[in-house]
């Protein structure tokens, strides 16, 4: 065991020697670092959770265990691991456990370490497994830091390209970069090499399906699982229910569809946006809209991007709202449909207060399109009593007055710069 831990220390030290892009979550992570609760960094695979944890602890004496290591899992013994950690990292102040959900019975071991006063940082790629187990075992004695692939601003910063523009040529170049981001996504490892997006994310997608779902949940109907995922990919930004999805795919069990869509959500591949209602029971019964965690997956699944440009923009805005901290589990983000069946893409709420409503429209130059989007947003705002209204477009900017409401039409390159 000591040999395994020593080898992982060498890997840790090599990773620490690399210079990384600072993430927006870094300040929050450092703020939590010295607190007693477990620091839980969650998010999709390869989004940068391990890097964030390393940055958070880089100037501290910390021990490291990576549970994506088959040798460690095969020979794991609590006593042997704890002894090896003490010998390889004498006097360590923090313990970083990477992808700990791969270890069977991990939560009970974590509880023991916590009782013994070990200051822990944990990363994991399964939303429900981590949150539910920790909630049950530790009764809320942890803080969660969610990390997704690069936001648009992080992506532009990583490429060292400004988004603030002064000339038409600068605006055109910024839009070119954002278009690449909108199509290839924000995974850090491919940000500078978008030409490998399809191969990289196809392989990652298959690994998530097989390792994080099929193996973990012992799924036997693998073809049906892929069919559900493919349907969700081809219908991203559209509303769905488990019943309608089962009927369309010819699957006899609605329960199976519910399980599979839940597994896909747990691994962060998809997120499901509820329809807003003041009655929780009605909200849970309504169709949800499906969104993909990163637009690069859409390219990887070989869908026609040019015909989906408006949906790609909407999916990107959804991702940006998650990265700004709106939490689906806390019912902070919704879509809304009025009594007259007019729809607004995003309703953002903090606590019981609706903060803002956002419509997404790639191109509003057609009079019919402009009328539809403005009337829908104003009508929904009237029903929800919200005065902060925006329409995010690709490259249009204006202020519109409608039915006593002021609607700000904002180009994407300016919207991503908003302070939140």
Image (cartoon, rainbow, N blue to C red):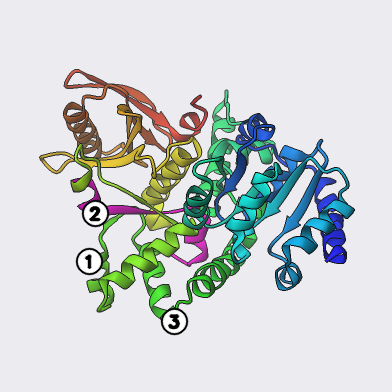
The residue at 38%/74% (across/down) is: 227
Does the segment drawn in magenta span residue 188? no
Secondary structure under the numbered disc 2 in the rendered image: loop
Q: In the depicted view, which residue is nearer to us: 63 or 359?
A: 63
Work out whether residue 304 can be spotted: no
Q: Which residue in the structure is indicated by mark 1?
A: 244
Provide residue 259's location: percent of width, then percent of height: 36, 67
Q: Distance between the residues labelled 3 and 1?
A: 22 Å
Q: Residue 220 carries which label?
A: 3
Span highlighted in magenta in the image:
282-303
Provide residue 353's location: percent of width, then percent of height: 31, 26
Does the segment drawn in magenta span residue 286? yes
Q: Distance between the residues labelled 2 and 3?
A: 27 Å
The quadrant in which residue 58 appears is: top right
Work out whether residue 83 can be spotted: yes
Q: Which residue in the structure is indicated by mark 2?
A: 287
The residue at 38%/55% (across/down) is: 308
Q: Do the residues labelled 2 and 3 touch (CB within 8 Å)?
A: no
């Amino acid at each position: 065991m000591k040999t395994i831990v020593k080898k992982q220390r060498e890997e840790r030290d090599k990773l620490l020697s690399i210079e990384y892009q600072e993430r927006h979550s870094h300040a929050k992570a450092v703020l939590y670092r010295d607190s007693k609760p477990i620091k839980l960094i969650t998010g999709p695979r390869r989004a940068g959770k391990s890097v964030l944890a390393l940055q958070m602890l880089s100037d501290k004496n910390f021990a490291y265990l990576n549970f994506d290591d088959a040798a460690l899992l095969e020979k794991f013994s609590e006593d042997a691991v704890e002894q090896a950690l003490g010998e390889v990292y004498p006097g360590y102040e923090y313990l970083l456990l990477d992808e700990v959900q791969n270890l069977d019975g991990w939560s009970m071991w974590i509880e023991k370490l916590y009782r013994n006063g070990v200051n822990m940082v944990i990363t994991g790629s399964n939303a429900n497994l981590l949150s539910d187990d920790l909630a049950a075992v530790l009764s809320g004695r942890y803080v969660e830091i969610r990390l997704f692939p690069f936001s648009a601003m992080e992506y532009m910063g990583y490429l060292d390209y400004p988004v603030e523009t002064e000339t038409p040529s600068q605006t055109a170049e910024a839009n070119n970069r954002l278009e690449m981001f909108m199509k290839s996504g924000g995974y850090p490892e491919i940000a500078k090499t978008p030409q490998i997006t399809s191969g990289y994310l196809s392989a990652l997608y298959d690994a998530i399906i097989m390792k994080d779902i099929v193996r973990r949940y012992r799924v036997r109907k693998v073809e049906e699982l892929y069919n559900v995922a493919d349907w969700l990919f081809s219908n991203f930004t559209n509303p769905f229910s488990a019943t309608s999805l089962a009927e369309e795919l010819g699957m006899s069990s609605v329960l199976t569809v519910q399980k599979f869509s839940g597994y896909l959500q747990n691994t962060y591949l998809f997120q499901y946006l509820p329809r807003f209602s003041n009655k929780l029971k009605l909200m849970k019964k309504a169709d949800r809209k499906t969104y993909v965690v990163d637009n690069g997956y859409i390219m990887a699944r070989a869908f026609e991007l040019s015909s989906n440009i408006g949906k790609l923009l909407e999916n990107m805005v959804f991702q940006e709202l998650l990265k700004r901290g709106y939490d689906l589990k806390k019912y902070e983000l919704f879509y809304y449909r009025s009594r007259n069946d007019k729809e607004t893409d995003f309703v953002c709420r903090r606590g019981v207060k609706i903060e803002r409503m956002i419509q997404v429209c790639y191109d509003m130059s057609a009079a019919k399109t402009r009328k539809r989007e403005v009337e829908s947003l104003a009508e929904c705002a009237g029903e929800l009593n919200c005065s902060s209204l925006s329409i995010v477009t690709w490259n249009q900017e204006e202020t519109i007055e409608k039915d006593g409401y002021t609607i700000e039409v904002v180009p994407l390159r300016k919207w991503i710069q908003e302070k939140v």
